[in-house]
Image (cartoon, coloured by chain):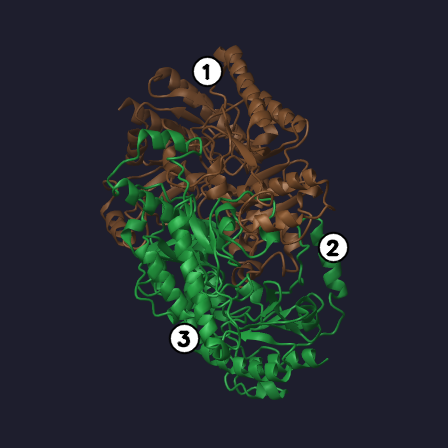
Chain colours: A green, B brown
Amino acid sequence: MRPVARINASRLFSTAATRRAAQPFFAQEPSAPSVQTAIPGPKNQAAAKDLLEVFDIRSLNLLADYEKSIGNYIVDLDGNTYLDVYAQIASIPVGYNNPHLAAAATSPEMVRALIDRPALGNFPSADWSHILRTGLLKAAPKGMNQVFTALAGSDANETAYKAAFMYRRQQERGGSEVDFTEEEMQSVMVNQGPGSPQMSVLSFKSGFHGRLFGSLSTTRSKPIHKLDIPAFDWPAAPFPSLKYPLEEHAKENAEEEQRCLQETERIIKEFHNPVAAVVVEPIQSEGGDNHASPAFFQGLRDITKRNNVLFIVDEVQTGVGATGKLWAHDHWNLSTPPDMVTFSKKAQAAGYYYNNPALRPNKPYRQFNTWLGDPARAILFRAIYEEIQSKNLVENTALTGDYLYNGLETLAKKYPQAIQNLRGKGQGTFIAWDSPNRDEFLAKAKTVGVNIGGSGVSAVRLRPMLIFQKHHADLLLEKLETLISA
Amino acid sequence: MRPVARINASRLFSTAATRRAAQPFFAQEPSAPSVQTAIPGPKNQAAAKDLLEVFDIRSLNLLADYEKSIGNYIVDLDGNTYLDVYAQIASIPVGYNNPHLAAAATSPEMVRALIDRPALGNFPSADWSHILRTGLLKAAPKGMNQVFTALAGSDANETAYKAAFMYRRQQERGGSEVDFTEEEMQSVMVNQGPGSPQMSVLSFKSGFHGRLFGSLSTTRSKPIHKLDIPAFDWPAAPFPSLKYPLEEHAKENAEEEQRCLQETERIIKEFHNPVAAVVVEPIQSEGGDNHASPAFFQGLRDITKRNNVLFIVDEVQTGVGATGKLWAHDHWNLSTPPDMVTFSKKAQAAGYYYNNPALRPNKPYRQFNTWLGDPARAILFRAIYEEIQSKNLVENTALTGDYLYNGLETLAKKYPQAIQNLRGKGQGTFIAWDSPNRDEFLAKAKTVGVNIGGSGVSAVRLRPMLIFQKHHADLLLEKLETLISA
């Protein structure tokens, strides 16, 4: 089964917007959204009531009919069809019911991966190396040749933190040959030092790195994410608060970034729980779509190098093509690669990449768990990456993103109150702006057939899939203007 | 596609052991293990070298050919066929290449679950309620009617801990209507109290609950699992150290359990970081197969009740039928059900069950993440549970377990040095003993065609699948005697 895209490219569409699409990736997509009921419609309401009895969905957005959803369009239980620029919180990469992924999902190796799930550290399958080399590792960031597989963003980050702590303590101990002391072996069993060290991971204010205990200790997005959960005494540095448009604030933004870098280095030098690693998102996503320049990240890499601190780049939301590069940190031209790069979401698989062999702990079973990821998801990732390559989707995202950004810039000039601090220029479709009545705006977007998400306190964030094209951008701009002008 | 078991029941097997199997669940299984090469064989060695370049497999046991593996038998790359009583660290439930699971894995709903993976808290599929009600919830422990879905044992436990902390703080605050204070909202963003409370989860010495930062803080199995990783200052209570055979040590074992209960209650009352929950395994598994009596667990339930502490039963390894009950805590006849029961491994899905509606935090997005589990794995669980029901596999495990235990008891009498502290009577196939040269014993077992695991420092642990039958038990006993007498 091969992708069907481009086969029906000559099909006639009825709107101005879709006429511009010479080669839609999903020829069977609807030509436009359609909303026939109040939202939520009666079927959604009934189903939600039923589901809520057994599963907490007070965060419900809509109940989806995935059988009918296709490409960039999600369909709800009442048959309403939305252009989806939220994409399961930025995690659907190449469209609903993508035929190439469907082929991978029904392959014999996928069936085996599902029903004979191995404990990968003990009993890997004969083809595990091949699956990694033709998939996850083929897509590895520059300078990275190994992968630790996990299950989602939170445990991808936490296992990277664990690798950092073990690496650092190994250094302090005098190398991988030096064994643990009796005191370490005893104290660790009662969660005390020196076996359980008082060390830390530095993260940035407004950053988001997950919701388990270690990752949540580095998450600084919103109180609601953290309240009542014990946290490690780890430090947070300020993340640059840039002013827009960037062209008009170059000097003060550069100063702001310098201030943040200086403060970061001060904390690393002075914080009472020694910093083993710095973790940072290329674009703070849940925290409100906060950007910084390549110079800031280069500065950060330099600081970590000269302070012997590991540099972990959290690409859980930015990774896999959305920013117009395969990995967002490709925009930075770093002098040396990050020490670890974590991924999840659009990879539909999770884990961290690395290169330095010393990041493997000195003994087996130190970085270990029963499943060590999921081969089913690694097989799916390979199919996603094949789609990305065969359809030039990173290039598509870069081009469509520029086109969309320009359209939004025009809208922002026309409606400066409605679209504030437009950001993400040159970052593919990873675009956001601040909206004065953001939550109301997001809810209303559904009524015109657009599924769109927010981040932080006031940002509208665009997270379309990699198969979002110019004709979708035209449609989206048209719908946004309808909403704003209403 | 329906299960093929029982169709070829009349097939003639060649060994004494297999002749006893009137109705093998997997008629196409080999009649016995076979080992043709040194272990590891040449193909395993070559493949391991290749894989080690990109993936840390210093914990490698063998490289498996899952295409050829079937039922209770795992086949390695050199064609060696092992009776598998380790089952991917106790996680394969109903046999390799189970046809009923294969049918579920190729169903249209599975394909959609794989390629259109939803953010379940925001955009659940139309059939998510149905999948839960016909699968995970149908198998729910008595008194539990809701489920929070996670991805593996570690995050299942950690999200249960989070629920416990939020519940406890909500109580202290005066109920779900009372809002957070400004001080809480501020302090939590810098990981300090009162927003990030100094509270704890009490676990037991030798317990294992996972390897992420929160779960690892409750894990007390071995130093190697914990060294160099920061941990929360949480308490550990003693777990009973029973003497075997139980019949001969009834009085002192009862006293030992009382001692542990008293100490547990003392810690709950006195520990400096207030205890929000107690977590316990029905049988400490990674920690060495340590058992306690129903009376101990009833006592624990009573202690948690009277101290207003939540009682979390970690059934990650014991759950889903292995102990001769669907859930191991069914053996206890508790006065009131646990507050939460966590699961993973043989469920091939993960999460926690609960009942009390107050365990849903007072606001949405407090217990949340992007995926909230994996519908693909929930669909697979349903197929597993259908197999368990249609083949009476819990009953099978209870009966086969008793049969196997009796055989081991006879062996232990004959070889008291080789089989010490035999335990797990009446606990299905969840059987273990101490071996004086355990690691050597496990390695040698491969040479006679048995894949078997260890736990703790000296235990040999049996973790066969639920489809392990009397003829497999005969084979295993025969092979064990061969090894022991050699």
Q: Is residue B375 above or below residue B335?
A: below
> Residue at the location (42% across, 68% down)?
A328
Q: Position of residue B389 (x, y in %)?
A: 59, 41
Chain letter for mark 2, please: A
Q: Nearer the viewer, mark 1 or mark 2?
A: 2
> Residue at the location (68% across, 42% down)?
B170
Tally the numbered discs.
Answer: 3
Res A390 label? 3
Q: Position of residue A478 (x, y in %)?
A: 63, 82
| Disc 3 and disc 2 in contact, CB within 8 angstroms | no
Q: Which residue is mark 1?
A: B245
Res B434 quadrant in image: top left
Q: CA distance from mark 3 to mark 2?
A: 43 Å
Res A421 quadrant in image: bottom right
Res A49 label? 2
Chain letter for mark 3, please: A
Quarter the C terminus of chain B occupies: top left
Q: Position of residue A446 (x, y in %)?
A: 68, 71
